[in-house]
Amino acid sequence: MDLIKSIEAQQLKENPENFRIGDTVKVYFKIIEGQTERIQIFEGLVIAINNSDVRKTFTVRKMSYGVGVERIFPLHSPRIDKIDVVRRGRIRRAKLYYIRERVGKAAKVPELIRRKDSKKKKAV
Amino acid sequence: MLGLIGKKVGMTQIFDERGVLTPVTVIKFEENVVVADRNEEKNGYNAAVIGSVDRKKKHVSKPYGGQFGELAPKKYLKEMRDFDESVSVGDVLGVSLFKDYAFVDIEGTSKGKGYQGVMKRHGFGGGRSTHGSKFHRGLGGTGMAATPSKVQKGRKMPGRMGGVKTSVQNLRIVKIDEEKQVLMVKGAIPGPREGMVIVKKAKKK
């Protein structure tokens, strides 16, 4: 089994997971069209993280012209150029599938605001 | 025919050169040694006998161990007819043999499934499970009446399933790791993990 682990280890990126569930992220995804390569940005809410190691994936949901679009990205895919966090979310569960049934304002995740002084206290 | 004896390590997923996540089976090659070189004059046909996985001399019978001469006895032996490359006894072969090929055929012993019914073993449709049906997973009729008043030979029936030699053809080579002596092919191959498999160059490509 160790041989498989070592093969998988070659594929892993270092610390690719700079976001959490509930965050709004921009995924810079490389698209190869014949010879040319371009980057497409997919921006939305991270509603789930599944599996582990090379198989680890995350689901991003966005509203596109009033239709919900979800896309599952393999976290360690070489086609992901980078992931930017646009907004942190305050959430209380690991999977945000309930968002699918909500419309409008109810489908929002409140922003996570960290108080500055609480951080300082920990440091001291 | 070009071929080697390998060991199925297991399955995983890797990103191929286009960045597509591909399911692969990992096959490990222990030292593959040419045990005998058979030729037209002496044996009436050309072949190379390949052995893999060393055993101790005291663990094999004398007649079996005798054929190895100076070499250590091998656990697995396979004769490859008309070996594509010229080899001599004692040569050590590895994955690099498959460097120029894109596809391989793999031969192994499938996992034993025990005594199975006709639905699993032969893919029969079976009957309805509800609405008063009394026919569920059985095989139905097995033949005609007074003529011929016997069941034809070869009738598909329940019985032992699996544990037989199985081949899978045209598996794409995704990656070759010479350092680890590992070959990765797309898709599944027969047999359990740690099972012995024979990897050959694809016959139909």
Image (spheres, coloured by chain):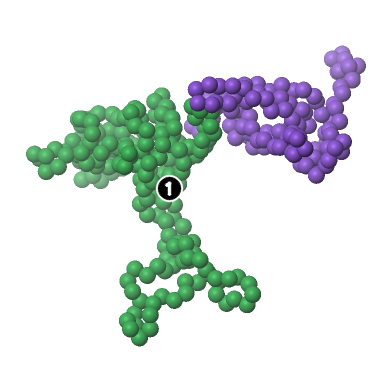
**Residue at the bottom extreme, as displayed:** B146
In the displayed structure, would residue A66 be above or below residue B91?
below
From the viewer's perspective, is B157 left or right of A2? Answer: left
Report the residue at 74% width, 39% height from top.
Answer: A68
Task: Give residue B142's position: percent from left, percent from top.
Answer: 41, 75
Q: Which chain is green?
A: B
**Residue receiving disc 1:** B191
Q: Quadrant of the C terminus of chain B?
A: top left
Chain letter of disc 1 in the image: B
Name the residue type under label 1: Gly
Task: Give residue B172's position: percent from left, percent from top.
Answer: 41, 36
Report the residue at 11% width, 39% height from top.
Answer: B40
Q: Is residue A95 visible?
A: no
Res. A111 image quadrant? top right
Q: Quadrant of the N terminus of chain B?
A: top left
In the displayed structure, would residue B109 be above or below residue A1?
below
Res. B84 image quadrant? top left
Circle 1: element type: loop
Q: Is residue B134 visible?
A: yes
Report the residue at 84% width, 33% height from top.
Answer: A109
Instruction: Report crowding for label 1: few under 14, some 14 to 19, many 20 or more residues within 10 A (C-alpha).
Output: many
From the viewer's perspective, is B128 left or right of A107? Answer: left
Relative depth, front residue between A23 and A26: A26
Task: Give residue A55's position: percent from left, percent from top.
Answer: 60, 35
Q: Which chain is purple?
A: A
Res. B174 image quadrant? top left
How many marks do you count on the picture? 1
Task: Give residue A105's position: percent from left, percent from top.
Answer: 87, 36
Relative depth, front residue between B99 and A24: A24
